[in-house]
Image (spheres, rainbow, N blue to C red):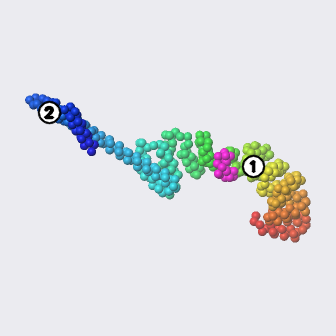
């Protein structure tokens, strides 16, 4: 169609030029014994025709000459389009959570495109991460190993700081119990990526196996600051670290406890479980006043039932404790644990009447094993065995 239009245009130009020049002129062509006389208009038309034929032949020749390259280029474009569609589909299935389709796409990509010389490293990293997060049951260990090695290769070539392959290898080693040197590797990784939650969680798991409690306390503290959503979980780890430091320290003493106390931050000193552990530890080494003071300091600000129980189970100066309990009465008088605590401290001071009043008030608020046991103890100490037995039996109805 383009050729036809070109010919029509040439003819139109030739005729137009001939009309402008006029029909009186002529052109003679002499070759050996031959002579051709042509009018100027005819000569112009033939010249233009020869020109268009020459251009057409040249284009045709070039098309034939470069046809294989053009075919190859079109084929590459088609393959590239298929690759992009496959990658897009894979990512969509991954976001939708369709692991079976992700697995199918990965298998097809691995077969057709992975070894391509023009493969994009960033794309390869993305696909490796998708593959290693795939939970399809058909995804074998060998296939996971393949994608892990691919991820290592890509991350090495990209020279990235966040090497996910390093964390996956560490996680596997931890599952297999191969922790030698693992803490050091993870510490180096966190040196490059201090905000990595997964890396720090792995490090804490390794440290828990190695029982390095002081380091666990430090790392769990950093996790609490980084991840508010799992704050309770990390606080439990901190509590365990403090408990283990207190129970596993050789030759535990007040000095050792104060050293551990010095490691704790303000927010950790607001944790009632940690306060309770430290208070009991002080009591066990004979520093009973320090035990009571720590609990009082906390209960002066806010209530905790477990600490209140420890307050009477690990007594110190009972006269001072009675004074503290009296000061709290307005705030905590409607709490049955407080009443039980007050009653038990009164028992230690042999204030039988007052002890009975608080314990019976506790039972009225909420019956408990501790309150019944304490009442039974009072009647036993005051030589009223029948009433004591009645309360012992009532206490026995509660689970231990």
Figure quadrant of the N terminus: top left
Magenta segment main secondary structure: helix
Q: Residue at x 12, y 32 (%)?
A: 36
**Range of the magenta residues?**
220-237
Residue 230 in magenta stretch: yes
Q: Which of marks 1 and 2 is in front?
A: 2
Which residue is label 1 attached to? 270
Q: Is residue 56 visible in this depiction of the protein? A: no
Which residue is label 2 attached to? 38
The CA span between labels 1 and 2 is 113 Å
Q: Is residue 200 visible in this depiction of the protein? A: yes
- Badge 2 marks a residue whose secondary structure is strand
Q: Which residue is drawn at 18% across and 34% down?
A: 41
Q: Which residue is drawn at 50% across and 40% down?
A: 158
- Residue 66 in picture, x, y percent from top left: 30, 40
Vertical order, 289 against 373 (above or below): above
Q: Residues within 10 Å of mark 2 (few under 14, many from 20)?
A: some
Q: Tell me: 180 left or right of 374.
A: left
């Amino acid at each position: 169609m383009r050729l036809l239009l070109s010919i029509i245009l040439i003819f139109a130009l030739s005729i137009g030029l001939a009309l402008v020049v006029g029909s009186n002129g002529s052109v003679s062509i002499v070759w050996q014994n031959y002579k051709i006389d042509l009018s100027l208009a005819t000569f112009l038309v033939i010249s233009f025709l020869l020109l268009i034929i020459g251009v057409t032949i040249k284009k045709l020749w070039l098309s034939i000459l470069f046809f294989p390259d053009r075919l190859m280029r079109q084929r590459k474009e088609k393959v590239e389009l298929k690759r992009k569609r496959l990658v897009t589909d894979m990512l969509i299935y991954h976001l939708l959570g369709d692991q079976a389709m992700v697995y199918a796409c990965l298998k097809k990509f691995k077969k057709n495109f992975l070894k391509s010389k023009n493969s994009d490293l960033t794309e390869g990293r993305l696909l490796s991460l998708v593959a290693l997060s795939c939970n399809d049951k058909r995804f074998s260990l060998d296939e996971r190993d393949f994608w892990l090695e691919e991820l290592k290769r890509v991350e090495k070539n990209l020279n990235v700081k966040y090497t996910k392959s390093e964390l996956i290898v560490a996680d596997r080693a931890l599952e297999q119990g191969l922790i030698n040197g693992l803490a050091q590797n993870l510490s180096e990784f966190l040196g490059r990526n201090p905000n990595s939650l997964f890396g720090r969680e792995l490090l804490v798991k390794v440290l828990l196996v190695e029982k390095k409690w002081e380091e666990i306390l430090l790392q769990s503290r950093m996790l609490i600051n980084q991840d508010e959503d799992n704050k309770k979980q990390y606080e439990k780890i901190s509590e365990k670290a403090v408990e283990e430091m207190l129970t596993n320290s050789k030759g535990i003493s007040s000095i050792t406890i104060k050293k551990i106390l010095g490691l704790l931050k303000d927010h950790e000193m607001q944790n009632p479980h940690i306060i309770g552990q430290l208070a009991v530890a002080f009591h066990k080494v004979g520093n009973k006043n320090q035990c009571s003071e720590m609990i009082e300091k906390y209960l002066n600000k806010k209530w905790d039932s477990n600490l209140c129980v420890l307050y009477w189970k690990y007594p110190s100066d009972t006269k001072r404790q009675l004074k503290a309990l009296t000061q709290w009465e307005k705030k905590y008088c409607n709490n049955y644990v407080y009443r039980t605590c007050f009653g038990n401290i009164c028992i230690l001071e042999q204030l039988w009447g007052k002890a009975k009043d608080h314990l019976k008030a506790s039972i009225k608020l909420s019956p408990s094993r501790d309150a019944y046991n304490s009442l039974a103890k009072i009647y036993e100490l005051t030589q009223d065995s029948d009433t004591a037995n009645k309360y012992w039996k009532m206490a026995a109805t509660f689970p231990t």
